[in-house]
């Protein structure tokens, strides 16, 4: 077997081991989240909203994956050995696998942690933390919408104008959310540009 294929197989092995650890942690986190959500009494799920910021993170990881693949394809001698007999070229084969696994893991976490609009309220879930914020429609007194470049920030306040939670939604998601809020609550909607 040539040295090149030994590096490819070793890089794939590193990616495989990393994937086992990453997806094991992801599955554990999802099981814990599901157990915690059984206590939420906001009715059945109507639709889910993505946090659009996750696509930037997944895109950056995919960009790094493409950069390392381009380096592998354009480098004549990626499997050189330096003075201390280490193999720095192996990192060019392991990192693309790690970036690909991380991108998939981040996407799956974001997919499972979407904001849930339910029949009796909204459940805002944080992707990178264990926090979730159940808000019943009758608790919502005011909704402030702040337009940002690629998404909108929705700030949900109670009748005393205390912040209950915030979430970020895309343009299409904002329209669906506003239609739901107008039909299910007596809150005032304030749009800031």
Image (tube, rainbow, N blue to C red):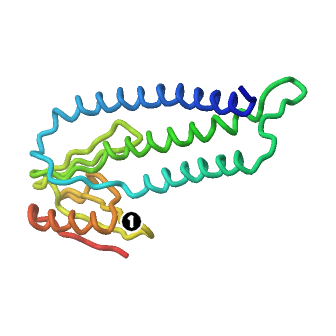
Total numbered circles:
1
For label 1, the crowd category at 10 Å Cα-Cα, with few meaning under 14, some 14 to 19 and many 20 or more, is: some
Residue 80, above or below 56? above
- Residue at image position (16%, 33%) is 39
Residue 45, above or below 33? below
Q: In the displayed structure, does residue 101 sit left or right of residue 70?
A: left
Place residue 137 in its image quadrant.
bottom left
Place residue 189 in its image quadrant.
bottom left
Q: In the displayed structure, does residue 107 sit left or right of residue 63?
A: left
- Residue at image position (38%, 65%) is 151
- List x then y, in percent, for residue 31: 29, 28
Q: Quadrant of the N terminus?
A: top right
- List x then y, in percent, for residue 22: 47, 30
Residue furthest toward the right?
Answer: 83
Q: In the displayed structure, does residue 157 sit left or right of residue 75?
A: left
Residue furthest toward the front?
Answer: 1
Name the residue beneath numbered marker 1: 151
- Residue at image position (55%, 53%) is 60
Residue furthest toward the bottom?
Answer: 193
- List x then y, in percent, for residue 80: 83, 34
Q: Helix, strand, or loop for circle 1? A: loop
Q: Quadrant of the C terminus?
A: bottom left
- Residue at image position (35%, 36%) is 130
Between 142 and 174, the one nearer to me in the picture: 174
- List x then y, in percent, for residue 121: 14, 51
């Amino acid at each position: 077997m040539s040295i090149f294929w030994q590096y490819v197989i070793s890089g794939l092995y590193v990616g495989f081991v990393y994937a086992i650890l990453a997806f094991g942690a992801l599955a554990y986190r999802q099981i814990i989240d599901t157990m915690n959500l059984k206590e939420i009494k906001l009715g059945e799920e109507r639709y889910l909203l993505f946090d659009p910021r996750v696509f930037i993170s997944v895109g950056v990881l995919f960009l790094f994956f493409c950069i390392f693949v381009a380096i592998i394809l354009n480098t004549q001698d990626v499997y050189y050995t330096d003075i201390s007999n280490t193999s720095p070229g192996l990192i060019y084969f392991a990192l693309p696998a790690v970036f690909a696994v991380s991108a998939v893991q981040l996407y799956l976490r974001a997919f499972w942690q979407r904001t849930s609009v339910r029949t009796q309220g909204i459940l805002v879930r944080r992707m990178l933390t264990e926090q979730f914020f159940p808000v019943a429609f009758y608790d919502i007194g005011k909704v402030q919408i702040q337009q940002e470049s690629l998404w909108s920030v929705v700030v949900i306040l109670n009748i005393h104008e205390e912040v209950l939670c915030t979430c970020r939604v895309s343009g299409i998601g904002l329209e669906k959310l506003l239609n739901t809020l107008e039909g299910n609550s007596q809150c005032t909607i304030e749009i800031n540009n």
